[in-house]
Image (cartoon, grey):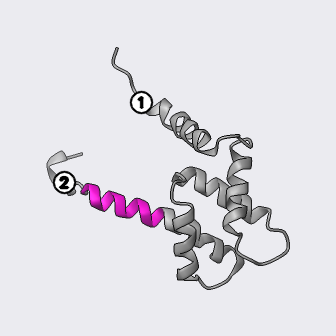
């Protein structure tokens, strides 16, 4: 491979990375409407985003998928409460949800951190 022929791609800015991450996070939420074949309700999506904003992407995906699976035969978007309930079940019904989320994040990223000691 000729490395000189490979054009360097511009490095995305922190703002661009943050915007992409936010879009991916919102796509997980909007997937609830897609899953039941209903048009996206922007106002409701914004309410969900506000209420669930502290949940990391990977954990949100698991909670949303669990809530959709548990919604039964009714073709409705799971409620915010149903998402939080699914999140609690995903984390093993912890007493302190905030601490459980922090531990989940640490567990996810611990394997990729290389310690120089």
Q: Residue 29, relative to residue 21: is it above or below?
A: below
- Residue 106 colored magenta? no
Return the x and y of residue 93 as percentages of the image width and height.
74, 43
Q: Residue furthest top?
A: 117
Most frequent secondary structure within the magenta stretch: helix
**Residue drawn 54% across the image and 81% down it:** 43
Please tell me in which quadrant of the rendered image residue 63 appears.
bottom right
**Can you say which quadrant of the picture contains the N terminus?**
top left
**Camera-nearest residue between 72 and 99:** 99
Residue at the spot of label 1: 113
Residue at the spot of label 2: 8
Return the x and y of residue 34 as percentages of the image width and height.
63, 76
**Residue drawn 60% across the image and 57% down it:** 61
- Find numbered disc 1 in the image and state the secondary structure of the residue it sits on: loop
**Residue drawn 51% across the image and 59% down it:** 53
- Find numbered disc 2 in the image and state the secondary structure of the residue it sits on: loop
The range drawn in magenta is: 13-24
């Amino acid at each position: 491979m000729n490395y000189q022929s490979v054009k360097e791609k511009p490095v995305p800015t922190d703002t661009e990375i943050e915007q992409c991450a936010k879009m991916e996070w919102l796509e997980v939420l909007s997937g609830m409407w897609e899953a039941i074949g209903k048009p996206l309700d922007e106002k409701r999506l914004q309410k969900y985003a506000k209420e669930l904003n502290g949940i990391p992407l990977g954990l949100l995906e698991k909670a949303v998928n669990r809530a959709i699976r548990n919604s039964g035969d009714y073709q409705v978007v799971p409620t915010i409460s149903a998402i939080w309930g699914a999140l609690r079940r995903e984390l093993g019904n912890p007493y302190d949800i905030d601490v459980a989320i922090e531990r989940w994040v640490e567990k996810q990223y611990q394997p990729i951190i290389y310690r120089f000691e």
